[in-house]
Image (cartoon, rainbow, N blue to C red):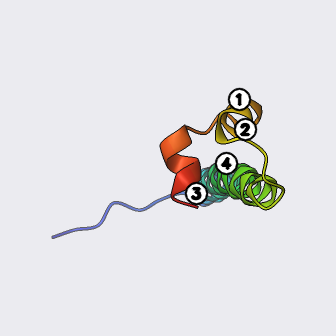
Amino acid sequence: MAMTPISKEEHERAKLRAQKKFEMDMTSNMITAKRIGIGVGIEMGIRIAAKRMLGTDMPIDVIAAATGLTEQEIKSL
């Protein structure tokens, strides 16, 4: 099978496209990871705060209203 020669210019354009695609993929991956990390961090922070509130004998319904967690979620802490 004969190979079609690629000009130096075409090769450079392909190289630049591949580099740009890699950069865009990496940026997208970093944004996604950051969003997931923030979401997990906030959820964990809310649970920690609710657990601390439980230690102060605050009523569960008040903790639920303050944190947005259900009473069942709070009881499971």
* Residue beneath disc 2: 67
Q: Are marks 1 and 2 in contact (CB under 8 Å)?
A: yes
Going from the N terminus, do you reach mark 1 or mark 3 first? 3
Q: Nearer the viewer, residue 46 or 12?
A: 46
Say whether residue 70 is visible: yes
Q: Residue at x 58, y 57 (%)?
A: 18
For the residues labelled 4 and 1, say whether their Cβ atoms are less than 8 Å apart: no
Query: Does the rendering let one see residue 9?
Result: no
User: Which mark, residue 39?
Assistant: 4
x and y, in percent, of residue 12 in the image: 65, 58
Q: Which residue is mark 3?
A: 18
Secondary structure beneath disc 3?
helix
Nearer to us of marks 1 and 3 is: 1
Q: Is residue 19 above or below residue 42?
A: below
Q: Distance between the Cα atoms at labels 4 and 2? A: 15 Å
Judge by depth and name the residue closer to the eye, 29 or 50: 50
Q: CA distance from mark 4 to mark 1?
A: 20 Å
Indicate which disc, 4 or 3, sits on the residue closer to the N terminus.
3
Instruction: Bin the neighbour count of mark 3 within 10 Å (Cα to Cα): few under 14, some 14-19, many 20 and up.
Output: few
* Residue type at numbered disc 3: Ala
- Where does the image place residue 77, in percent across and percent down from the top left? 58, 61
Q: Earlier in the sequence, mark 3 or mark 2?
A: 3
Q: Residue 62: x percent and y percent? A: 74, 33
Circle 1 sits on which residue?
65
Q: Secondary structure at mark 1?
A: helix
The amino acid type found where label 1 is placed reads Ala
Question: Which label sits in the foreground, 4 or 2?
Answer: 2
